[in-house]
Image: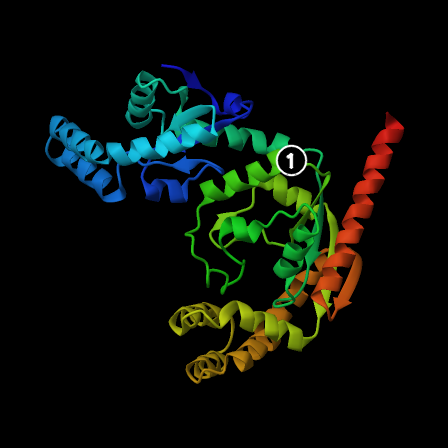
Amino acid sequence: MKTISFEEFLLEENAVLIDVRTPKEFLLEKIPNSVNVPVLLDEERVIVGTTYVQVSKELAKKKGVEFISKRLPEIFEQIQELSKKYSKLIFMCARGGMRSSSMTSLFASLGYKVAKLEGGYKAYREFINQIIPKANEGFKYIVVHGRTGVGKTKVLNKMAELGVSVMDLEKMAAHKGSFFGALGEKLPQSQKRFDGEIFEFLRTCKTKYIVVESESKRIGNLYVPEPIYESMTNGIHIFIDTSITNRLDILMEDYTHVPSDEIEECIKKVARYVSKEKTNNYLRLLNEGKLRELGEILIEQYYDPLYEVSIDKHEFEFSLTYEDMDSCAKELADYFFKLEEEISSSSNIEL
């Protein structure tokens, strides 16, 4: 059976990683651009594992074969479609064990050009943990700061549309970085998936500068890798601001669709840092459906004072107060391209 390391996979021109783990495993530990073709579904894997522990290894194997046999026609169709798009199919599982081995052997016997990812996801994880510091070398970071509701993420998204290299750490982390940061997010947080997304961005980035939103080292329950955070700290810092009206419009756009019970849970977290009287007022406004008023009071009483404590930690290259978000994104994008041009010209002179 042919095996291939993840480093070797990166050199392949037209290969695809086929992850045969369960949908739940894939969701939490996905390798970017891989495809999930599960050998066992989530509940099936639980049954097989329970049988292995509580009954016998032999019966567990039998149940596994039964489950897989039922899904083989569907698996075959999925692999057949992938083989039309890719010249090589690389199967992987958690550790490069039975699941990926069985699929690699099966489809090799059917004449497909296949290989197994050596060591599976575990080996991939070890590889990127070692390589992220090196992959980050040579990049310079432009860090965009701003108070809650100023629309940093939206501005950066518009910059990305203009061709700027934007690393959206909050999207990668599935969290917006505050007590309310998990609201509206569909994916569960996963440090492994987060690290993988960061590595993939660095690996494929073609510019010397990277634009990021100002973040603390921790985003929700996840941690920004140390080399990335250090580069952000030492980067170029820019401050953007807008009117309270615009800030509230942005917050309403982001949070009005969120169920009130989820907002209430976040208010209870804030309660640790404000008076009981203020907390009760926040909950009253929520229960009365006065979300805009709630947002304004939270900005004035909690978020802005909190931000003022940290704002002096950085020296800003420049500050920009906007009314039109598109114009703000365009001005920041122009600044990015100017820096890119300067560093490119400098490199040519050195040559």
Indicate the quadrant where residue 92 lies: top left
Pick whichever, 227 or 192, lies toward us: 192
**Residue drawn where x is 59% and y is 41% of the image:** 226
Where residue 139 appears, as percent x and y from the top left, is: 70, 38
Where residue 124 appears, as percent x and y from the top left, is: 46, 29
Where residue 74 appears, as percent x and y from the top left, is: 28, 36
**Residue drawn where x is 60% and y is 74% of the image:** 249
Does residue 89 appear left or right of residue 315 in this picture?
Answer: left
Q: Which residue is mark 1?
A: 136
**Residue drawn where x is 65% and y is 67% of the image:** 150
Indicate the quadrant where residue 34 lies: top left
- The colour scheme of the drawn protein is rainbow
Does residue 316 appear left or right of residue 292 in this picture?
Answer: right
Secondary structure found at label 1: helix
Does residue 339 appear left or right of residue 72 in this picture?
Answer: right
Indicate the quadrant where residue 77 lies: top left
Task: Name the amino acid, label 1.
Answer: Asn
Image quadrant holding the N terminus, namely: top left
Does residue 104 appear left or right of residue 172 in this picture?
Answer: left
Image height of 250 relative to 75, above or below: below
Pick whichever, 83 or 311, lies toward us: 83
Residue 127 visible in rendering: yes
Residue 121 visible in rendering: no
Where residue 95 appears, as percent x and y from the top left, is: 36, 27
Q: Residue lying at the far top in this picture: please name it.
A: 1
Image height of 272 relative to 116, above or below: below
Image quadrant holding the C terminus, namely: top right
Q: Residue lying at the far right in this picture: please name it.
A: 349
Pick whichever, 308 or 337, lies toward us: 337
User: Dot 1, how many residues are within 10 Å of its Cα: few (below 14), some (14-19), or many (20+)?
Assistant: some
